[in-house]
Image: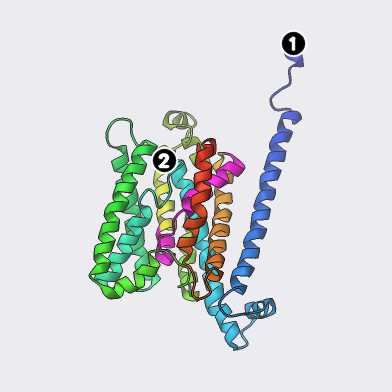
Amino acid sequence: MSLSTRPRPDTEATRRPRGAQALLRGGGLAVLGGVVLLLVVLSTWIGTKDTSLAQVWSALWGDDGSYSTEVIRELRLPRTMVGLMVGAGLGAAGAVMQSLTRNPLADPGLLGVNAGASAAVVFGMGVIGLSGFTSVVWFSFLGAAATTVLVYLLGASGRGGPTPVRLALAGAAVSASLTGVIAGLTVFDLGTYDYLRFWMIGSLAGGKPDLVLDLLPFVVVGLFVALLLARPLNSLALGDDLGRALGAKLARTRIWGVVAVTLLCGSATAAAGPIGFVGLVVPLVARWLTGPDMRWVLPYSMLLAPVLLLSSDILGRVALSEGELEVGAVTALLGAPVFIAMVRRRKEISL
C-alpha cells in the first residue's frame, strides 16, 4: 500500500468510535443520575412510619406541622443527603487512592485510613470529651492524614518502593494496631462505648439537618480537588518516568491526592463511621464500565457509591421486622460478593 492511500490516524473514521464511546459513557452517567434521584425519593419515602409519596412531596415544599412532615424533614431527608455526600466522598476517595498507589486493592478501609480517622474520633470523644461533627471532624482529618502518610512510608521502605502488596500489608498492620487502640479506649469508657458500638459499624441514622450543612463544604472541596486531579492521575498511572516525560508534577499530584482523600475520608468517617467496601468495590466497577481514564472513573464513582450506600440503607430499614441493620453491615454483605467476582475475573481489577 502506498503512503498516500494509508488512512490517517486523525480521520473521521477513527474519531467516530471515540465519539460514540464518549456518548455512551455520558449516557451512562445520565442513567446513574436518574437512579440516584429515584433512590433519594425512595429513601425519603421508606421508613418505619408509613408515609405516602404525596406526604413526601408536600413535606419537601412546606412544613404543615404534622408528625409525618417532621419525620420527613428532620430525619429522613437529612439522612438521605448525608448518604449522598458520604457515598460520593468514599467513592471518589477510593478511586484516587487506587490511582495514586497503582493498587486496585487500595481503599480507605484496607489501607488503614478509616481506622486512623476512627481512632482519632474515639480519642476525641472518649478522652477529651468532644461532641458534635464540627469539633470531631478535625480529629478525623488528623487521624486520616497521619495514617495515610504512615502507611505510605511503611510501604515505601526497603527495595522496590511502595508496591501494592507492601501497601496492603502496611495498611493491614496499621489497621490492626489502631483497632486495638480503639477497643482499649472504648472499654474504659462505657458511655463512649454505648455510642461508638453503633457508629463503628457505619450508620446514617444520626443524620440531622445541622450535620448536612456541616458536612457539605468538606465534601464539595474534596470532590472538586479530586476532579482536578483526573488528568494528572492518568499520567501518574503510566509510571513515574513516563509521567515526568509527559510533564506531570508527580509530587504535587500526590500531595493534592492526599489532601482530597483526607478531606473525603475524614469527613465521611466523622459523619457516618467507618463504612467499608464502598471505596474498594465502586471504583473497580466504575473502571470496568468506563476503562482506566480517571476523567470518567471519578464521576462514575461519585454516582455509583451513593447508589450502593442509599440502596444498602433502604434495605437495612426493611430487612428486619423490628429495628434496622446498620448501613455498614449491609454494604459489606453486598460489596463482598461483587469484589470476589471481580477478583476472579482478574483483568477487571488491573489499573
Q: Is residue 105 magenta?
A: no
Q: Quadrant of residue 328?
A: bottom left
Task: Categorize mark 2 by other alpha carbons within 10 Å: few (<14), some (14-19), many (20+).
Answer: some
> Which dot marks residue 341?
none
Task: Categorize mark 1 by other alpha carbons within 10 Å: few (<14), some (14-19), many (20+).
Answer: few
Q: Which residue is mark 2?
A: 101
Q: Is residue 279 magenta?
A: yes
In the rendered view of the protein, which quadrant contains the N terminus? top right
Can residue 228 be seen in the rendering of this structure? no
Q: Residue at x 37, y 48 (%)?
A: 111
Q: Residue at x 75, y 29 (%)?
A: 13
Disc 2 secondary structure class: helix
Residue nearest the viewer, comparing 182 with 136: 182
Residue nearest the viewer, comparing 248 with 206: 206
Q: Quadrant of residue 141?
A: bottom left
Estimate the x, y position of residue 168 in percent, counting from the top left. Answer: 36, 43
Q: Residue at x 27, y 65 (%)?
A: 123
Rendering colour mode: rainbow
Q: CA distance from mark 2 to mark 1?
A: 46 Å
Estimate the x, y position of residue 72 in percent, counting from the top left. Answer: 58, 78
Amino acid under disc 2: Thr
Stretch of the chain drawn in magenta = 266-291
Residue nearest the viewer, comparing 103 with 320: 320
For the stretch drawn in magenta, the main secondary structure is helix
Position of 69 compared to 226: left or right? Answer: right
Q: Which residue is mark 1?
A: 2
**Which residue appears farthest toward the top when viewing the image?**
2
Position of 158 compared to 306: left or right? Answer: left
Estimate the x, y position of residue 278 in percent, counting from the top left. Answer: 49, 54
Can residue 322 be seen in the rendering of this structure? yes
